[in-house]
């Protein structure tokens, strides 16, 4: 599951770290030998005062974006909100492979391969989003690790990835060149993108709105509509309760999306809205 993991200045993914250990902001992550693991438990956790210590036995080939789900399933009761989740996620990646860039390259290569061969849980969402992109220029809002921009760059789309986190965009910039899929990046608020009107044919916001309250989400949608010459594509998860550890604060269902689409079209009759369900919910806004 792709999630917007990194907030500004909270996690530096390339910060110096000892071999097999990650430590920052009250979180310590260590890799342990596989033979010491209890059957079925890939993680153990303990808390000493303000410090959370996590031990794991993941191997380099297991590093991919599905780590988010594994952490939630096995450490959900230990993690105190999104900041600890982000630190542990980063710590697992960094403690599994020696060297900052080497660790993230392994994580990216594994994740991209699983998303593009269809084996990742999030793969159907990326595949559907790619089918919905029109035109040669794309802006992706709230890109986080940037897996979707990397996918679109592979097929020759001129893509700009954006995110509020500078370290995340720096990481994507560095990794995308090493993967020979150079992606342009921009650190910015998705509701205030410093680009002219109609800067791209398509603007995507994939699993972003659930992280935002309604007024902020409306501002992001207004900005997406300003930037898009032809189409805006929005995808959201359908959850019984927003997943707090992922930073989700807002719940969507098909009725909510229809109401949102009707409101946007009422404000500008030149828009055409399509709402449908496919591994979550989709809102597609086209200029007539």
Image: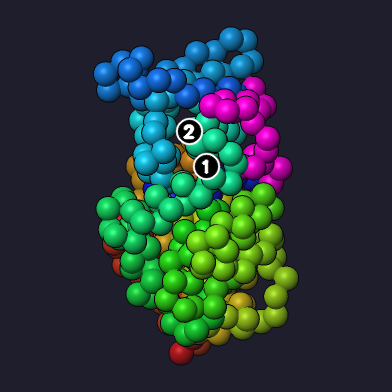
Whether residue 220 is visible to the viewer of this picture, yes or no, is no
Residue at horizontal 55 percent and vertical 60 percent from the top: 178
Asked which secondary structure carries label 1, the reply is helix
* The disc label shown at residue 92, or none: none
**Distance Cα–Cα, label 1 vs label 2:** 7 Å
Prevailing secondary structure of the magenta residues: loop
Neighbour tally class for label 1: few under 14, some 14-19, many 20 plus, Cα within 10 Å = many
Asked which secondary structure carries label 2, the reply is helix
In-front residue for pair 133/237: 133
Q: Position of residue 77 (x, y in %)?
A: 43, 22
Where are the magenta residues, as a range?
Answer: 8-26
Whether residue 93 is visible to the viewer of this picture, yes or no, is yes
Residue at horizontal 62 percent and vertical 60 percent from the top: 173
260 w.r.t. 230: above or below: above
> Position of 258 compared to 89: left or right?
left
Q: Say if the magenta span includes residue 261.
A: no
Q: Quadrant of residue 72?
A: top left
The residue labelled by disc 1 is 103
* The disc label shown at residue 96, or none: 2
Q: Quadrant of residue 214?
A: bottom right
228 w.r.t. 243: above or below: below
Residue at horizontal 44 percent and vertical 71 percent from the top: 154
264 w.r.t. 220: above or below: below
Q: Residue most toward the top?
A: 48
Residue at horizontal 27 percent and vertical 53 percent from the top: 119
Q: Mark 1 or mark 2, which has the lower sequence index?
A: 2
Q: Position of residue 194 (x, y in %)?
A: 73, 71
Neighbour tally class for label 2: few under 14, some 14-19, many 20 plus, Cα within 10 Å = many
Q: Position of residue 234 (x, y in %)?
A: 45, 66
């Amino acid at each position: 599951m792709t999630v917007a993991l990194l907030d500004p200045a909270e996690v530096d993914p390339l910060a110096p770290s000892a071999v097999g250990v990650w430590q920052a902001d009250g979180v310590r992550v260590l890799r342990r030998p596989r033979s010491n693991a209890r059957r079925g438990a890939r993680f153990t956790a303990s808390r000493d005062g303000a410090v959370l210590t996590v031990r794991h036995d993941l191997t380099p080939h297991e590093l991919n974006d599905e780590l988010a789900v594994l952490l939630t399933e096995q450490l959900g009761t230990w993690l105190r909100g999104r900041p600890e989740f982000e630190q542990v996620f980063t710590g697992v990646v960094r403690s599994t492979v020696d060297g900052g860039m080497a660790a993230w390259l392994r994580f990216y290569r594994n994740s991209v391969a699983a998303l593009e061969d269809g084996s990742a849980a999030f793969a159907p969402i990326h595949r559907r989003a790619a089918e919905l992109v029109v035109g040669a220029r794309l802006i992706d809002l709230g890109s986080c690790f940037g897996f979707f921009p990397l996918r679109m760059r592979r097929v020759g789309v001129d893509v700009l990835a954006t995110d509020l986190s500078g370290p995340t965009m720096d990481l994507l910039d560095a990794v995308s060149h090493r993967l020979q899929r150079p992606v342009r990046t921009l650190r910015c608020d998705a509701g205030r993108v410093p680009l002219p009107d109609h800067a791209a044919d398509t603007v995507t916001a994939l699993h972003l709105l659930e992280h935002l309250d309604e007024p902020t989400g409306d501002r992001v949608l207004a900005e997406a509509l300003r930037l898009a010459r032809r189409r805006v594509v929005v995808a959201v998860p359908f959850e019984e309760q927003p997943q707090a550890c992922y930073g989700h604060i807002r719940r969507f269902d098909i009725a909510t999306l229809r109401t949102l689409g009707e409101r946007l079209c009422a404000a500008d009759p030149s828009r055409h809205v399509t709402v449908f369900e496919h591994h979550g919910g989709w809102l597609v806004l086209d200029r007539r």
